[in-house]
Image (spheres, rainbow, N blue to C red):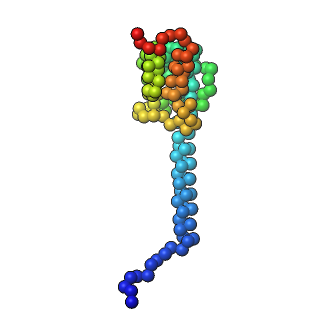
């Protein structure tokens, strides 16, 4: 005689039901997470568009305020500038020439000019091309490729 208790096996339908429930909860959680980040993603995209348009329009002068940035009118705005003020933080003290020098000498160094108000990275769910710091870096590299300026400090 065996002293072991009989094994309790779950029926296959209970295992499948549990797996389906876990999968449904995962899908709901993922959808909610993306949905929650959509407004911030549009804010990131709009901010990048505005800064690059401002640089193009005002001879590569860095904007000094939201009022300056509001003057950029040749780009798509997915978020009103009033909403950007509470969603996005911009380093207004940047010198464009310093940015160019940094881009010329350190292509791989990421920029951190545009962040969330707490200084963390903005969510850009529509792809890396919509992240404002990537857009600015792309503009800097494009600008360097179009100019005849030296790319190294002498």
Q: Is residue 70 visible?
A: no
Q: Nearer the viewer, residue 42 or 86?
A: 42
The x, y position of residue 146, in whole percent, is 57, 14
Q: Residue at x 56, y 53 (%)?
A: 27
Asked where in the image residue 74 lies, by quadrant, the reply is top right
Q: Residue at x 55, y 12 (%)?
A: 147
> In the displayed structure, does residue 18 sit left or right of residue 76?
left
Q: Nearer the viewer, residue 84 or 44?
A: 44
> In the displayed structure, does residue 94 sit left or right of residue 55?
left
Seen as rendered, the residue at the extreme bottom is 1
Q: Nearer the viewer, residue 98 or 36?
A: 98
Question: Is 144 situated above or below 1?
Answer: above
The x, y position of residue 5, in whole percent, is 40, 82
Counting every numbered tag in the picture gives 0
The x, y position of residue 102, in whole percent, is 44, 19
Question: Is 116 situated above or below 63?
Answer: below
> In the displayed structure, does residue 75 sit left or right of residue 96?
right
Question: Is 20 situated above or below 2?
Answer: above
Q: Residue at x 47, y 14 (%)?
A: 151
Q: Is residue 87 visible?
A: yes
Q: Residue at x 46, y 77 (%)?
A: 8
Q: Quadrant of the C terminus?
A: top left
Q: Quadrant of the N terminus?
A: bottom left
């Amino acid at each position: 005689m065996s002293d072991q208790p009989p094994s309790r096996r779950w029926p296959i339908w209970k295992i499948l039901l549990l797996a389906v429930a876990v999968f449904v909860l995962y899908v709901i959680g993922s959808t909610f997470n993306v949905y929650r980040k959509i407004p911030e993603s549009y804010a990131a995209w709009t901010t990048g568009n505005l800064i690059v348009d401002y640089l193009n329009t005002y001879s590569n002068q860095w904007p000094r305020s939201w009022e300056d940035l509001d003057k950029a009118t040749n780009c798509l705005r997915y978020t009103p500038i009033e909403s950007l003020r509470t969603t996005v933080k911009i380093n207004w003290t940047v010198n464009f020439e310093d940015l160019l020098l940094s881009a010329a000498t350190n292509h791989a160094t990421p920029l951190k000019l545009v962040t969330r108000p707490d200084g963390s990275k903005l969510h850009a769910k529509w792809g890396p091309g919509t992240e404002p710091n990537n857009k600015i870096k792309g503009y800097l590299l494009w600008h360097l490729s179009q100019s005849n300026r030296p790319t190294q400090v002498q």
